Amino acid sequence: MKQSCEVEARERWGNTQAYQEHTEKTKGYTSDKWSEANEGLMAIFAEFAALKNDGIEPNSAEAQALVVKLQKHITDNYYTCTDDILSGLGQMYVGDDRFKKNIDKYGDGTADFASRAIAAFCEVK
């Protein structure tokens, strides 16, 4: 499965600057570094779930701060996450059932909440 995801990513985004940056940035990652980066990413989605469960709105200061944290994490660990890329990711989190299912493991509606928080963030800019 991992290999097919890698092939799909290369086919979809292989010609982009972000993909090239990702390849360069992660080429020396050990399995521990990959785990750290991926677990950190998923921990942010767990934080989105907690906000959602607490009745916080996606456009709240708390949710917007979490979007900033997500964008920084992606930039620090994978590739420069511009606002345009972030917006696209937010749409993919709900538009691609694989992403939605993975994010919603922290609670139904987490992907939608994160997507709406990202949309609010990108709209304000």
Image (cartoon, rainbow, N blue to C red):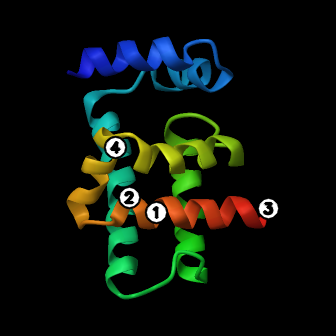
Secondary structure under badge 1?
helix
Do the numbered discs 1 and 2 sit on residues whose CB atoms are within 8 Å?
A: yes
Query: Which quadrant does the C terminus fall into?
Result: bottom right
* Residue toward you, 11 or 36: 11
- Residue 120 lies left or right of residue 14; in this view the side is right
Q: Which residue, given by chain and number where applicable, does mark 2 sit on?
A: 111
The label number, if any, that marks residue 99 in the structure image: 4
The label number, if any, that marks residue 29 in the structure image: none
Q: Which residue, given by chain and number where applicable, does mark 1 sit on?
A: 114
Q: Residue furthest bottom?
A: 55
Q: Amino acid at mark 4?
A: Phe
- Rendered residue at 38%/58% (across/down): 111
Q: Amino acid at mark 1?
A: Ala
Residue 114: x, y in percent?
A: 46, 62
Q: Which residue, given by chain and number where applicable, does mark 3 sit on?
A: 125
- Residue 81 lies left or right of residue 108; in this view the side is right
